Image: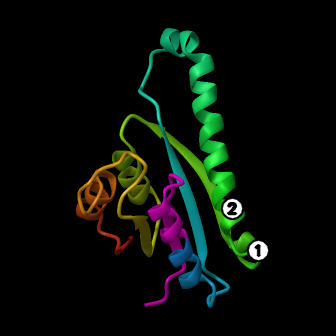
Amino acid sequence: MLINNILVPYDGSECANHALELACDIAKPNPDARIEVVTVVQAPHLSAKAEEEFAEVLRLMDEHGKETLEKAMEALDPDLNDQVQTFILKGPKPGDEIIKLTKERDYDLIVIGSRGLNGMKEYLGSVSHKVLNAVSVPVLVAR
């Protein structure tokens, strides 16, 4: 199986860094491989009025998402920069947003950290567990 399209959900955690490294190792031998690194800004769905009231908070959340993706790009092998695309998703539940994305795009593999920044003490974090059990795409869980 040739792996051309890889999704890496990224939150800046140690496990997410391992996932990104694994994705890069998988993509490196294939010049046609593409890696999409996505971070989810955990923002609730708001009405237009609420968005106005919380505009500064939402701007800060977006800024944090951009900084998270910049850290991911800094960690990449420069030879892979042309093969990597980053973007931000917004929604109240990161797992749901990642699952929705996998249904909209054609991925060959998802490489996800086993636990994120929320401090879950289980073997699998809630986001990786949810994604693993809800998608039809192969999932590689990095520790």
Residue kind at label 2, given as amino acid type: Met
Residue occupied by mark 2: 73
Q: Nearer the viewer, residue 121 or 94?
A: 121
Instruction: Magenta stretch: give its range.
Output: 1-20
The image quarter in which residue 80 lies = bottom right
User: Is residue 136 magenta-colored?
Assistant: no
To which residue does mark 1 refer?
Answer: 78
Q: Position of residue 13 (x, y in %)?
A: 49, 56
Could you tell whether 59 is left or right of 109 in the image? right
Q: Is residue 66 above or below residue 69?
A: above
- Amino acid bearing label 1: Pro
Picture quadrant where residue 91 is located: top left
Decide whether residue 2 is among the magenta residues.
yes
Q: Residue at point 66% right, 36% down?
A: 63
Q: Position of residue 98 (x, y in %)?
A: 41, 52
Which quadrant, please, contains the C terminus?
A: bottom left
The answer to whether 80 appears left or right of 18 in the picture is right
| Residue at x-position 31% and y-position 58% | 131
**Where is residue 134 shown, x and y percent of the image?**
25, 59
- Picture mark count: 2
Quarter the N terminus occupies: bottom left
Q: Up-down: is 137 above or below 40? A: below
